Image (spheres, grey):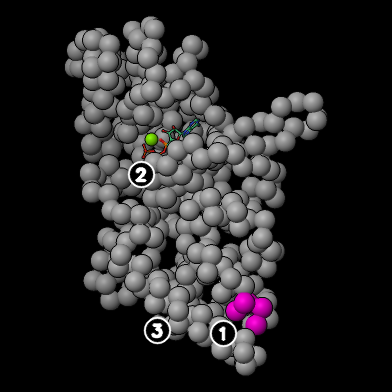
Amino acid sequence: MIDDVLKLFPELKKNDFRILAGIELGMKDREWVPLPEIRRYAEIPIDKLAYRLDWMRRRKLVVGTLDPYEGYRLYFEGYDALALHTYVRRKTFDGIGVEIGVGKESVVMEVMKKPELAIADPEVYILKLHREGRTSFRQVRRTREHLAGKEHFSWIYAARLAAEREYDIMKKIYPDISVPRPVDQNRHTIVMERARGSELSKTLLLEPEWHLDEILTQIRKVYQKGIIHSDLSEYNIFVSDEGVQIIDWPQYVTIRHPHADELLRRDVSNVLAHFARKYGIERDLDETIAEIRSGGLTETVGTDLPADTEEEGEEETDDEPVGEIWRKDPESRKNVMKAGKTVRDRTERLLRTGQKNG
Ligand SMILES: Nc1ncnc2c1ncn2[C@@H]1O[C@H](COP(=O)(O)OP(=O)(O)OP(=O)(O)O)[C@@H](O)[C@H]1O
Ligand SMILES: [Mg+2]
């Protein structure tokens, strides 16, 4: 869990980040990064490397195997540690606050940056750690088995891609569209300003008609840029006296997407359904959609995006069932424990004998 990473963070040493970064790099090509490769990258003597790998393995930042060779890979927590390290080095933030949300596909925390002047209040930002890959873990495994080991485990890329996608689109549409200001991005994470107000789902509005119009205006404005949110609901909209802000953008699609019409329809219908249910406001779905579409494109944000956007969008909007958290997958758990034990045995043996072979 992210809490564990935060507790461990102060204990992590410079070498540990080199080891983690070495594993990260190696995971581009393979599922298990061989020990010699990690050693080459980290440039740490084998006994130290073995000791720190074991330390991080016991704390669930990495996981190891001996079969078919001694190799390691990151857990999400190890990847989290690398991203946190980068932000602290860049001075994006220097303190971590409370966890404010665990979604299907992310963990969201408050982070703080000390002010330059001691008299000012610390700035509070939101850190979103994407977790996309974990939901398709089983599927990746299945594919991999089917391909007889040719495909490597790619959750790192699923999560990183989602974070990059989300950050890029927020950069493109802010401040024209009312979204929290994007602040920074690294690996599978993004940093943004805190949304104003509270989640629509948790709020009782005094002027629901006004807020509904504000939301529809945002949907229309972003549509005119060629973009459809594609996961819009009362959970991804913040409301305040000043207006609305829309969050959670990684699954956006462009209006060229083959399912663009359906996705827009679903977004608008979710919003209208919420206002009908909670406030008895009745608006016609088709008329509302026609209004959103009227006026045509004002900008080409969506149509300028790379062609692969369409494919990704299609994949991500599939209603595939969400698997368990991969760390809790009983099958993977078994593997992890088995691998963990053999690795520990080997590391202990290495330490005992001072044997240097790696
Ligand atoms: N900028 C922000 N300001 C305030 N709260 C935020 C912000 N971003 C995210 N949150 C909180 O964290 C929750 C999860 O964030 P988000 O919806 O982006 O992720 P998610 O994992 O895709 O969520 P889900 O899959 O549950 O929809 C939000 O519902 C919201 O409560
Ligand atoms: Mg959400």
Residue 79 in the image: state x and y as whole percent. Answer: 52, 58
Left or right: residue 134 compared with residue 291: right
Which quadrant would residue 15 be assigned to in this image? bottom right
Q: Give the magenta-colored segment's residue range.
A: 47-51
Q: As shown in the figure, which amino acid type bears the numbered disc 3?
A: Pro
Q: As shown in the figure, which amino acid type bears the numbered disc 2?
A: Lys
Residue 133 in the image: state x and y as whole percent. Answer: 38, 55
Q: CA distance from mark 1 to mark 3?
A: 19 Å
Q: CA distance from mark 3 to mark 2?
A: 33 Å
Q: As shown in the figure, which amino acid type bears the numbered disc 1?
A: Glu
Q: Residue at x 40, y 71 (%)?
A: 336
Q: Are marks 2 and 1 in contact (CB under 8 Å)?
A: no
Q: Residues within 10 Å of mark 2 (few under 14, many from 20)?
A: some
Q: Decide whether residue 254 is among the magenta residues.
A: no
In the rendered image of this protein, does residue 142 appear above or below residue 116?
A: below
Front label number (1 vs 3) = 1
Q: How many marks?
A: 3
Residue 251 in the image: state x and y as whole percent. Answer: 36, 39
Left or right: residue 357 compared with residue 248: right
Residue 151 visible from this viewpoint = no
Q: Nearer the viewer, residue 58 or 184?
A: 58
Ligand 2: give its quadrant: top left
Mark 2, ligand 1, within 8 Å: the answer is yes
User: Circle 1 is placed at which residue position?
Assistant: 348
User: Circle 2 is placed at which residue position?
Assistant: 104
Q: Residue at x 54, y 79 (%)?
A: 35
Secondary structure found at label 2: loop
